[in-house]
């Protein structure tokens, strides 16, 4: 596992994005060409990372982190105070988790994560980012009209629930800790982990369901 240097990551992030076109598909192809041409990675390395995060990591790690926070109050406190350290303690420290902040949903607050610059995302915990997260429409509208965006995902918030939008960057990324569903008392870590959705850890899902 390579080390995470936030200053170097930020420098590379700014440099690369100054050369990227606006269209998401072109941005991906251009970014791949840039990092390969600079000798930072090979095309074989990129294919291996894509296979790893799409097929093996997925959102499973993040879901386990959330489920553990539901079961263990001490871990929950650690996660909210120092998410990067808490994740490191579980052995999940890696790319895009060096600077990580966990934000929890409550009865009066809902959290939504976006990256208005591009698509920064804690992929070591959540796997590959979904296409909609990278789209220009989501990146722009999530900030301007978050309630409308949430409604399009099926999340209808009562007026008493405030929405806070968190803008990810190369220096700081976010993990939403959804509320534990009612009726899950007595469930173990594996069972709770299975209830956590990727979207709930981004904020486009809210009311998780206990098994029938």
Image: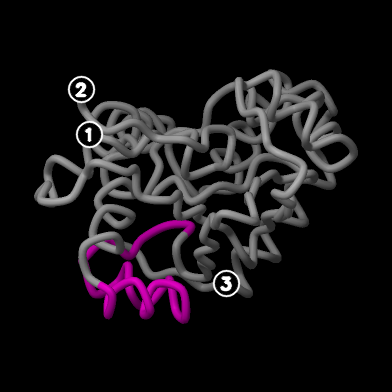
- Position of 57 with respect to 85 (left or right) is left
Q: Tag 2's secondary structure?
A: loop
Q: Nearer the viewer, residue 166 or 21?
A: 166
Q: Which residue is mark 2?
A: 212
Alpha-carbon distance for marks 3 and 1? 25 Å
x and y percentages locating residue 124 in the rendered image: 38, 50
* N-terminal label among 1 and 2: 1
Alpha-carbon distance for marks 3 and 2? 44 Å
Q: Residues within 10 Å of mark 3 (few under 14, many from 20)?
A: some
Is residue 212 inside the magenta stretch? no
x and y percentages locating residue 61 in the rendered image: 27, 48
CB of mark 1 within 8 Å of CB of mark 2? Answer: no
Quadrant placement of the C terminus: top left
Q: Which residue is mark 1?
A: 56
Q: Which residue is mark 3?
A: 6
* N-terminal label among 3 and 2: 3
Is residue 87 inside the magenta stretch? yes
> Which residue range is magenta in the image?
73-96
x and y percentages locating residue 25 in the rendered image: 68, 18
- Residue drawn at x 35%, y 49% is 180
- Residue drawn at x 80%, y 27% is 148
Q: Tag 1's secondary structure?
A: helix
- Residue drawn at x 73%, y 54% is 164
x and y percentages locating residue 24 in the rendered image: 72, 23
The disc label shown at residue 145, or none: none
């Amino acid at each position: 596992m390579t080390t995470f240097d936030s200053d170097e990551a930020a420098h590379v992030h700014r440099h690369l994005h100054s050369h990227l076109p606006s269209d998401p598909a072109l941005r991906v192809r251009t970014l791949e060409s840039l990092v390969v041409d600079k000798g930072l990675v090979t095309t074989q390395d990129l294919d291996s990372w894509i296979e790893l995060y799409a097929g093996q990591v997925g959102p499973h790690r993040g879901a386990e982190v959330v489920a553990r926070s539901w079961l263990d109050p001490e871990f929950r406190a650690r996660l909210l105070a120092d998410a990067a350290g808490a994740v490191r303690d579980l052995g999940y420290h890696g790319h895009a988790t060096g600077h990580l902040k966990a934000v929890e949903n409550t009865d009066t607050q809902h959290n939504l994560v976006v990256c208005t610059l591009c698509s920064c995302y804690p992929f070591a915990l959540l796997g590959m980012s979904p296409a909609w997260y990278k789209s220009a429409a989501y990146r722009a509208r999530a900030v301007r009209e978050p309630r409308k965006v949430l409604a399009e995902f099926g999340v209808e918030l009562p007026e008493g629930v405030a929405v806070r939008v968190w803008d990810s960057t190369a220096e700081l990324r976010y993990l939403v800790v959804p509320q534990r569903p009612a009726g899950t008392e007595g469930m173990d870590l594996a069972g709770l982990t299975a209830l956590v959705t990727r979207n709930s850890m981004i904020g486009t899902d809210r009311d998780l369901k206990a098994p029938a």
